Image (cartoon, rainbow, N blue to C red):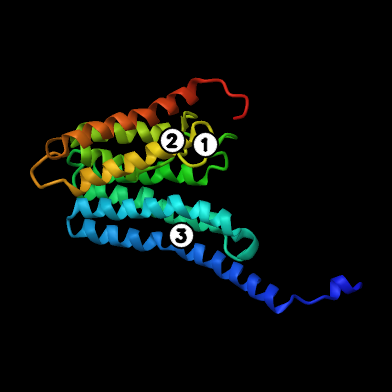
Amino acid sequence: MNKAENRQPSPRGFTHLKARVLAAWAVHAFTASGVVTGLLAISALMAGDFRLALLWLGAALIIDGLDGPMARKVRVTEFAPGMDGAILDLVIDYLNYTVIPALLVYRFGLVPDGFAIPAAAWIMMTSLYCFANREMKTGDNYFQGFPAVWNLVVLYFYVTASGPWLNLLIIVALGILTFVPLKFIHPFRVVWLRPVTIAMTGVWGALACVLVLGSQPGHLPAETSPTAYWAFLVVSLYFLGICLWRSFKAVEKS
């Protein structure tokens, strides 16, 4: 054994290593906080407050959007290898993206009478394939098949005040699309037009907050915030357009 192999870390080096380890575990804790926002969303839906439940799901969405870049920045796989951040993220996402939205569909009668349990079960069962699919993403970081973002689906139900039968049709169709290799954009990971997409995501999120926060009992969001409502729908068309373009365009890397 040579001297270099026998050399012990300096106190300064040890302190730096300890800081990196703490930072990695702090990111894991930040990811785990998504389960707390999920619990608060469940509390709100049990209290019959659809609006507050959506706001807590929005907070969970922000956490999920930030934890990935943070994890890569502090290199969690290197400095906290005992915890699988990917599995942690999937568990929390299944709660916030699938289970709670399914409960919202059931709790608030978003589908016709007699279809609440089947619709919620359809959401939860089809999503299992999405979360367990080893080929969930393409080489250029698009999702293959509907990526089980049911939290966004119930948000659109709330904002557009769509009817129960239309909601049921959409739920059935999206569940089927889970198994169809159409492409859905990941707003932070897809490189093509990434700066524009991130900016549009920020605008979309701000408009969603305006619509949910500004909603009033007995009034449609389109009535209380008409400008934000139509802007929200127009921005949504941007994401829909990219998904359709990528789905039907031949791409070498896929």
Instruction: Find numbered disc 1 in the image and state the secondary structure of the residue it sits on.
Output: loop
How far across and down, in percent of the image, does residue 57 sit?
A: 32, 52
Q: Is residue 123 left or right of residue 22?
A: left
Give the residue drawn at x 57%, y 64%.
Answer: 83
What is the distance, in whole Å, between disc 2 and disc 1 at their CAs? 9 Å
Identify which amino acid the numbered label 2 is placed on.
Thr
Relative height, residue 181 to residue 106 (above, below): above
Disc 3 or 1, which lies upstream in sequence? 3
What is the distance, in whole Å, between disc 3 and disc 1 at their CAs? 21 Å
Q: Is residue 184 left or right of residue 174?
A: right
Q: Give the residue pinned by disc 2.
A: 197
Mark 3 or mark 1, whichever is nearer to me:
1
Q: Which label is found at residue 190?
A: 1
Give the residue drawn at x 52%, y 51%.
Answer: 69
Relative height, residue 51 to residue 148 (above, below): below
Q: Give the residue pinned by disc 3.
A: 31
Q: Residue furthest right?
A: 1
Location of the C terminus (image quadrant): top right
